[in-house]
Amino acid sequence: MRNTGLYFLSMTETETHEWVELAIEAMGGKVSALAKAIPVSHQAVRRWRETGRVDNRHVAAIVNVTRGQVRPEQILSDVFEAIDPRYR
C-alpha cells in the first residue's frame, strides 16, 4: 500500500470496492444516504468506488454509520496486514 498523503490505496481494487459496496448497502443501497451520513459529497463516495481511495479521516465515520458492517480492517486492509499477519 502506498501512503499518498491523506489517502491510502488498497493493493487490490476488489477489496476496496467490496467495502464501498457494503457501506452503500448498509445505507439502504443509496450513495447519497452514505454521503449524507458521513458527511461527504455524493461525488466523494463515487470516487471511492472508482479509485479505491478514501481519506483517512472518514474511516471512523464509515464504520460508525454502517454500525460495524464495514470494519476498519476492511477499509485499510493493507495497513492491518502490515501490522498483524493474521489479517492476511
Image (cartoon, grey):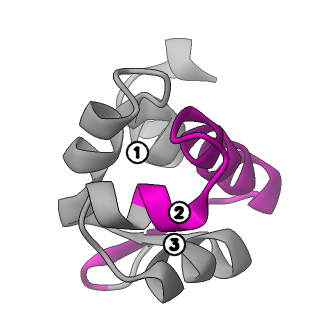
Tell me the magenta residue range: 5-34
Residue that label 3 marks = 45
- Viewer-proximal residue, 80 or 62? 62
Q: Amino acid at mark 1?
A: Val
- Residue 48: x and y, percent? 57, 72
- Residue 19: x and y, percent? 61, 43
- Viewer-proximal residue, 68 or 54? 68
- Dots 2 and 3: beta carbons under 8 Å? no
- Residue 44: x and y, percent? 45, 82
- Image: 63 above or below 44: above
- Viewer-proximal residue, 49 or 74? 49
Q: Main secondary structure of the magenta part?
A: helix
Identify the element where label 1 is drawn: helix
Residue drawn at x 58%, y 83% as measured from the top left: 47
Residue that label 2 marks = 1
Q: Earlier in the sequence, mark 2 or mark 1?
A: 2
Identify the element where label 3 is drawn: helix
Q: Amino acid at mark 2?
A: Met
- Residue 71: x and y, percent? 42, 28
Q: Earlier in the sequence, mark 2 or mark 3?
A: 2
Mark 3 or 1: the one toward you? 3
> Distance between the Cα atoms at labels 3 and 1?
21 Å
Residue drawn at x 66%, y 80% as measured from the top left: 51
> Distance between the Cα atoms at labels 2 and 3?
20 Å
- Dots 2 and 1: beta carbons under 8 Å? yes
Residue that label 1 marks = 79
Q: Earlier in the sequence, mark 3 or mark 1?
A: 3
